[in-house]
Amino acid sequence: MVDWVTLELDIANFDDALFEHHLRRARSSGTRFTTMAELGDAPEHRRALYDLNKTCSSDIPGRGLFYTYDEYVTQRIDVATYDPRGVIVALQDFAWIGMSATSLRPDDGYAFAEMTGVLAPHRGKGLSLALKLLAIRFARSSGYQRLVAFHHPGNHAAIAMNRRLGFADAVPDQARQVS
Ligand SMILES: CC(C)(COP(=O)(O)OP(=O)(O)OC[C@H]1O[C@@H](n2cnc3c(N)ncnc32)[C@H](O)[C@@H]1OP(=O)(O)O)[C@@H](O)C(=O)NCCC(=O)NCCS
């Protein structure tokens, strides 16, 4: 049985200023940040998000088979928790190179970090930190104080990324809520 790692960020104590330089650096090297809401709900945008998510998810330990496109639409986009304002996308020219998707969980009292991914050639440059900074701002501006993430214990890069942002181990009650 996999012992999933559940992490939580206290948004009220998150200091944006510590991570601003990652956003500035990405922008100055030609990366543009937008959201699915700004891009518009067009079939080509859904497909590009799917392709990006699928490629990045192939590096998640224990992920198994990814959704077909139709499954992705019905199970990840056309669902109540999908919020296009919370799906941050990083673009270089017309290429989709990174994403961070956050959903709002009013019944649970937290925002949930659904998926952050950066295409392999663009990793190691702070892009995930820039994406998560924008994701945290989305959660905060939506009135949430807690951002929860859930990881396979073998996903060292993702766990380290979240800890770098200040995520800490969630208490067992919260872990049970998302499992
Ligand atoms: C996890 C992932 C998003 C990180 O993206 P990235 O843009 O390369 O990460 P960054 O360059 O912003 O690094 C941020 C921090 O994460 C940690 N980190 C990133 N890659 C790491 C690795 N391979 N090993 C250990 N720590 C790593 C570091 O702490 C780093 O901060 P530092 O460089 O100041 O030490 C990327 O590896 C990825 O897309 N993986 C596949 C998809 C996935 O597993 N997503 C998470 C599941 S939701």
Image (cartoon, rainbow, N blue to C red):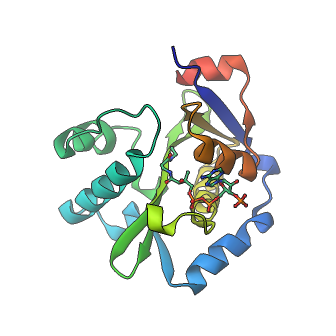
| Up/down of 135 relative to 179, above or below | below
Q: Nearer the viewer, residue 113 or 144?
A: 113
Seen from this angle, which residue lies furthest top? 1
Q: How many marks?
A: 0
* Identity of the residue drawn at 30% across and 66% down: 40
Q: Left or right: where does residue 24 sit relative to residue 35?
A: right
Q: Is residue 27 above or below residue 109?
A: below
Is 57 rendered above or below residue 170?
A: below
Residue 168: x and y, percent?
A: 76, 37
Left or right: 100, with 16 as reference point: left
- Using residue 9 as the reference point, say whether residue 139 is left or right of it: left
User: Front-most of 30 and 122?
Assistant: 122
Quadrant containing ligand 1: bottom right
- On the image, which quarter does residue 84 sit in? bottom left
Q: Quadrant of residue 68?
A: top left
159 w.r.t. 118: above or below:
above
Left or right, residue 23 beside residue 30? right
Residue at 23% from the left image edge and 58% from the top image edge:
47
Residue 171: x %, y % from top left: 73, 22
Is residue 88 visible to the viewer in this orientation of the structure? no
Task: Judge whether residue 105 can be spotted in this image.
Answer: yes
| Residue 56, percent from left and from top | 41, 52
Identify the residue at image location x=63%, y=73%.
23
Residue 174 in the image, given as x and y percentages of width and height:
65, 23
